[in-house]
Amino acid sequence: MELLEEQRETWGTRGGFVLAAVGSAVGLGNLWGFPYKLYSYGGGAFLIPYIIAMFCIGVPMLILEFSLGHFTQRAAPNAFARCNKKLEFVGWWGVILGFVIITYYPTILAYCLSFMWYSIESIVRDTPLPWAGEGVEGVENAKNFFYDTYLGYHKDSALGGFQWHIFGMLLGAWVLMYFCIFRGVKLVGKIVWITVPLPFLVLVVLTVRGLTLPGSMEGLVYYLDPTWSELAKPTTWRFAFGQVFFSLSLAFGVMVTYASFLHRKSDINNNASIIALSDFATSFIGGLAIFATLGGMAYASQQAGSSIGVGDVVAKGPGLAFVAFPYALAQLPGAAWWSLIFFFMLITLGIDSAFSITESVLAGIVDKTGWKRGIVLPVMSLVGLGSGLVFVTQGGLNWLGTVDDFINGTWGIAFLGLLECVVLGWFYRVENLRQHANERSDWRLGKWWNFSIRVFIPVVLGTLFIWSLFDDFSNADGFIRTPEGEWILPNCVGLMIVGIAPVIAIFMSLMKNPNRQDSIVCEKTVSDKCTTQGRSASGVAFAVSVVSGVMIVWLAAAGMLEGLLLYAAFALGMSGLLVSNYVLNRYDHELVTPSKLARCAGIIATADVSACIAAVLIRLADSSAGAGVEEAAKSIPADKLGAVSYVILGVVTLVVFGGLGWCFYRAIAAFGSDEPVEEMK
Ligand code: PFF
């Protein structure tokens, strides 16, 4: 395998890279997104799709992105281009979706800066926090303060007036981000030694504090007790999967870019596992801290004679952090100090995630054009700031929520994740990347990883995509138009953004820069040489995949996507998928490349199999819809955790601590030894 021996700028230390990647992954999404999504979509039941997505998709894809970045030493667009020049647009697509995130993510940082400022004011002036209040009144105060006083919130999709006080803080957030990255990754590698451990410490303190409050159990019931019927809804799965992509900063090009700055000899597999486990642990512990504290607060209010419950303090949606937290914090002795620490923690959590996206966009442009970092960064920051102005209006929070849903939903990043695996799996030899990762890692990936990138992940994400597509368009209230024929503006804009991204991506990839020639290092020169056996197998795989596809389209058109014919189509699709996967494994090596038919067959078969599974899920979900209503009516929160919640707690603790313990053990065992390590079966 051809290897790049050049070495670009590096992180300095392994710790610097791991912390920077953890810093990118662990962000506002863990404390702002994960808990409210979990609470809104099934409590403990949400953890099932989340854990599946985190470990069956997140970790293998993180390894894929790390090896790609490390192997090619380029930011995402050029990294893909170095594997196969036609794939550059995939890298740009992620970078563009990342750019959309940096238009709104700093707005949330701006909220944090404002709340930190209010806390400082209250400390200096020795006055209560501006949202302070007890019991029911406290909840109302916190809601009114955030929505009315601070945001001047408009519920409808109109923009409303511009909020200058938020803009001031937004500017502050961009200046902070700018100074963190303007000197390159060396400085970032140092800053993260503060911005990563500090939030962990504060989080541990807040968790212990929350868990020792009387009444904390009631909060945990809300957090952990599963509502199983939620699992039958595609929204639960898509939010869980989208949250994993967002949380691990996957498919946005960030992890490819960060790994491109890694030293040539650095570990890949173990680092990816440590990062994913730390991210999951932070989300889970953050959820414990939040819900335990909310339980304690609700209990305190009940003692004071109010009938308030945990459900009344938890705002489902982007308001959670800025209504429930301030309310909870205002009840503590020394409230302003706690509030200051908390919002400072959110800023340190968010800042390294925010600058990681900026870095990925920046590195993408610099690698492609060869332009100077010192010019691209300020221009890009100004464009990011300018495009984010829409979120600094009275209706800004609605737009922020919608854009976030689209970017991090099946239409946005989950689809791109699917594409990333499909193109690398079928149009590039992922075995190269597996070998590259294994040559330098504390433990080795088995061949199952190739199967997972080429077959398993695309089928899972493909199924989710088709299931969600069906769900969106069969929604009785309409998706882009109401039944009365009115346009649903936010969804139209969301769709437009995710729709325009690939167009810009293709345009960027076609752009030529005469000043910069980037050699293609991974693409093989041989083409279409394959044995007769291989060619016949490819032909068979192609034929059965096409027949399966035609059957599915025909069954769907006739409204008969069920029964024996569906299973027959599934069996054909599955055979096409397995045979083409076999052909690639068997015939794709240094001197031979299999027929293009096998590659096309694989992709068609992936779509076939996904469609069949989605059809079955749609029917199952329909038939369990009635049962869900009953279950929802039954689940009245108690102040004792159910047995299942204890099992969930036990499993998560085992996964996190067992997993991290094992990773550190492997890192220590491999330290200083150049011996080949044994393969993971
Ligand atoms: N992972 C970050 C969080 O959970 O807040 C957000 C993020 C960072 C998303 C980088 C995407 C990205 F490229």
Image (spheres, rainbow, N blue to C red):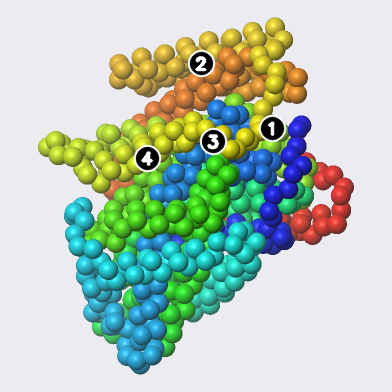
Q: Residues within 10 Å of mark 2 (few under 14, many from 20)?
A: many
Q: Secondary structure at mark 1?
A: loop
Label pair 2/4, CB-CB below 8 angstroms: no
The residue identified by callout 1 is 521
Going 31% across and 58% down the picture, which residue do you hit?
Answer: 389
**Sequence-earlier tag: 3 or 4:** 4
Image-based side of 60 in relation to 158, left or right: right
Question: Label 2's element?
Answer: helix
Asked if residue 636 is positioned above or below residue 83 in the image, the reply reads below
As measured in the structure, the alpha-carbon distance from the residue carrying label 3 to the one carrying label 4 is 26 Å
Mark 1 or mark 2, which is nearer the start of the sequence?
1
- Tell me the distance, in whole angstroms, between the alpha carbons under discs 4 and 1: 31 Å
- Residue at image coords 54%, 65%: 180
In the rendered structure, which disc, 3 or 2, sits on the residue that comes first in sequence?
Answer: 3
Q: Which residue is mark 4?
A: 498
- Please identify, in this view, whether the residue under mark 4 or under mark 1 is nearer the observer: 1
Which label belongs to residue 312?
none
